Amino acid sequence: MSTRADVIIIGGGPSGVAAAVELRRQGVARVVLLEREPHLGGATRHCSHSPFGIREFGRVYLGAAYGKRLEREAGHAGVDVRLGHSVTQIGADGEIAVSSARGVETLTARRVLLATGAREMPRSARLISGDRPLGVVTTGTLQTYVAFHGLMPFRRPLIVGSELVSLSAAFTCLTHGARPVAMIESAPEPLARAPFRWFPALVGVPFHRGADIVDIRGVQRVEEVSFRRADSGVETVACDGVLLTGRFVPESALCRQSALGVDAGSGGPAIDQDGRCANPIFFAGGNVLRAVETGGWAFREGRAVGRAIARDLAHDEGASEAVPVTFDAPLKLAVPSLLRRSAHAPAFPDFQLRFTRLAQGRLSLELDGREVWHKRGDWRPERRILVPIPPAAFHAEHVHFRFREGE
Amino acid sequence: MLHDPAPDIRETFDVAVIGAGVVGCAVARRFALAGARVAVIEKGSDLLSGASKANSAILHTGFDAPPGSLELELIKAGRSEYLDIHAGLGLSLVETGALVCAWSALEAGKLEDIAAQGRANGIAELRLVSGEEARRSMPGLSGHLVAAIEVMGEHIIDPWSAPLAYLTQAVALGASFFREAEMLAGRFDGDWTLSTRRGDLRARAVVNAAGLYGDIVDQRLGFAPEFSIRPRKGQFVVLDKAACPHVPRIVLPVPTEITKGVVVCPTAFGNVLIGPTAEEQDDRVRATVETDTLKALLARGAEIVPALAGIPVTAVYAGLRPASDSKAYRIFARPEMRAITLGGIRSTGLSAALGLAQHALSLHAGFGLPATPAPTAPGLSMPNLTETRERDWQRPDHGEIVCHCELVTRREIEAAFESPIPPGDFGGLKRRTRAGMGRCQGFYCNARLAEMTRGRLSEPLAVDGIEEPEDA
């Protein structure tokens, strides 16, 4: 079976649905949205206590209700939504291999949007020491246990991480009959600073920063965990699980296994200011670009990229050679990481930057060696930094973010 | 969750195989094919619960085995039988060949001896090549390569489906598989009475294939200690499937006295393995991974194949090899007691298992028991989990894809539970289907699997349902 679409969108989370709806609004006829799960909504479906929808729909939705709203929006807009469709491979010519209950088919499209989102890094990729018993899971897994199946993977977990999602994870535990034994963070300061001043104490869960797991013990399930604290040696706590929170990474396996590849900094596909990849028939938007932002952010990004794809299809201007955006350490990523010549307003008005670690110093943007923007500051790890893209950048040969630590 | 019946003392088996690792499964198959009534007694809640669950999945030629050794003979016999039977059992066989890589002049100086040993071992398809020539067959190799030996005929296989096929074939021929049935004591009074955690059973002969517990099982059978097991841990890193195009062949180092060394090789599932380490320890249970060691393995992998740097880690694991106080296999036959011990099968068990089974049967023939008529081997086709042949997700009506990273279907998971030897624990389900084995390690599918496996595994994924908080 073969289908020729104008645009195929891979991933039915906020960014994918927003792009699909926008493409239909712009008059694009055949918009196919492929979602491997049985419902739209992506990660918002199991985030049961984060409010979604305020800016895009003017009201608050919780958990699966937001996905239901996305399903209605997609339906009203005339998007060809295909649930339970897993993309197994993407080809350079826009050929998309799909597996569904019907078997395998190949779809083709003039443009393809990757909106496959992000996930947390598992225990294996974190290279954590110890036995490998049951009960070591991520926040996303915990929340799908609770939200979709009414199950719990543990009763007394140790929570690892201090991002905002870590608080959400603790809250999910506390509201579902599980009592965290402690929260630990390997960095010297919590990544989401403010709530960690008061939240753990409020709910009676000890919080240790500068603490790393050195051993997990357990034959079948987790029985105890030892962690080393910078100030007071190794501490061992009895627990029946380890809840790994945060450290989101783009779900970019399709890119990695195709000629598109991924950007070394972000781990997602490299895009230009319109969300267009190096291969100009591919676009990307949402959390696959740089891991996690809010659902609302992903929605707005998807909508903007959807608009850019519609313009691209209408004018078929062709894509100029892309100029890479480079940066100094300890910057981690820049999105977009490519720039192309263009005269119109870009889908991405700003560079999104992140640092790998806490750094104090002077950050500047240079176009062809000339500084056009700078700012001094204490740059915190994993925080979003926005730098407006100056119009001149679209015509520069060299675009570089310079960082001078200590200046 | 016990699916199978408990042992019954009123029934006398022809042979009791102690341990359902790869060796025990192969032995059970060989005896069942010879017409014996076989009991397999396993301590764990599933087969492959010990040493056999973690290895490098290579089917060796034996080119580097000790010349003239029983190990070499059994590797060759085991490999040869695998080549004969794999297609009939639906098992994969991927011929990658291997390169023994010398990274210094010193190592290169040893290649000639290794090649000579390989030829003496009867492995003809083996030749010395320059670093440049080796890189032509595998361009991903580092430019630091000095020279290499190319060994044809080295294969990678699915290390879990193969022993499962052996045991499934034995069960189809009437063998009984008793799990969570640790053998506690044995008494010989003309026949054996074996006490297990699940009850007693009688057998005319016993085969000790207890791997990491081989010496303990010999003691429990009342034998004077002939050897002692010294577990040797091996840690591994599994890289994302994006690594696979860079590693088309098995890359072996020049071995030392202690170990074959760190191998970089593709897997039949489309990943790349880096490992193992070789770490002596006393503990027979704990096989921990360690952050620093895993980092060192990643660094070593990237030295050998530079493009591996930065490719994400999919999984990490550690296994214990049942090494003994000697390099040789520790095989003992006690005809007067009708007992065979297959001990100290250190790191070549997967390759030699079928050969060990043949050897055990020939030792058993010396026990003077009446021969049994050999039945017809039942047809059998294992589900394919490897990337080299069609997978279930490529066929219609698979229900849904449950594990997105490994593309495991609901139909495959249900088939595993409905199979003659259903999974006893989550590890067993993963080994039978690959569910949860992929890059997200269950972020997307673990909860769904918790629901699908409720009441079906010895240790459930989920604790009881959600409780209202008492004091929050």
Image (spheres, coloured by chain):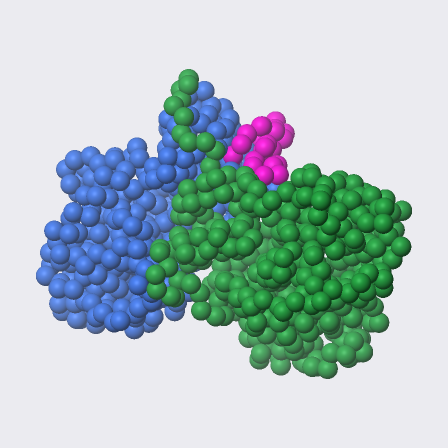
Chain colours: A blue, B green
Q: Is residue A236 magenta?
A: yes
Q: Position of residue A335 (x, y in %)?
A: 32, 54
Residue B470 in sight here: yes
Q: Residue drawn 34% across and 37% down?
A: A147
**Quarter-wise, where is residue B412 in the image?**
bottom left
The magenta stretch is A213-241
**Quarter-wise, where is residue B135 in the image?**
bottom right
Q: Observer-nearest residue: A291 or A47? A: A47
Is residue B358 rendered to the left or right of residue B269? right
**Residue situated furthest top in the rendering:** B471
Is residue A238 rendered to the left or right of residue A112? right
Quadrant that contains the C terminus of chain A = top left
Is residue A354 rendered to the left or right of residue A281? right
Quadrant that contains the N terminus of chain A = bottom left
Is residue B344 rendered to the left or right of residue B37? right
Q: Is residue A358 magenta?
A: no
**Residue situated furthest front in the rendering:** B10
Residue A191 lies, with reference to residue B329, above or below; the image says above
Q: Residue drawn 63% across and 69% down?
A: B376
Q: Residue drawn 18% across and 43% down?
A: A69
**Quarter-wise, where is residue B87 in the image?**
bottom right
Residue B319 lies, with reference to residue A168, above or below; the image says below
Q: Residue drawn 12% across and 54% down?
A: A77
Residue A275 in sight here: no
Residue A215 lies, with reference to residue B123, above or below; the image says above
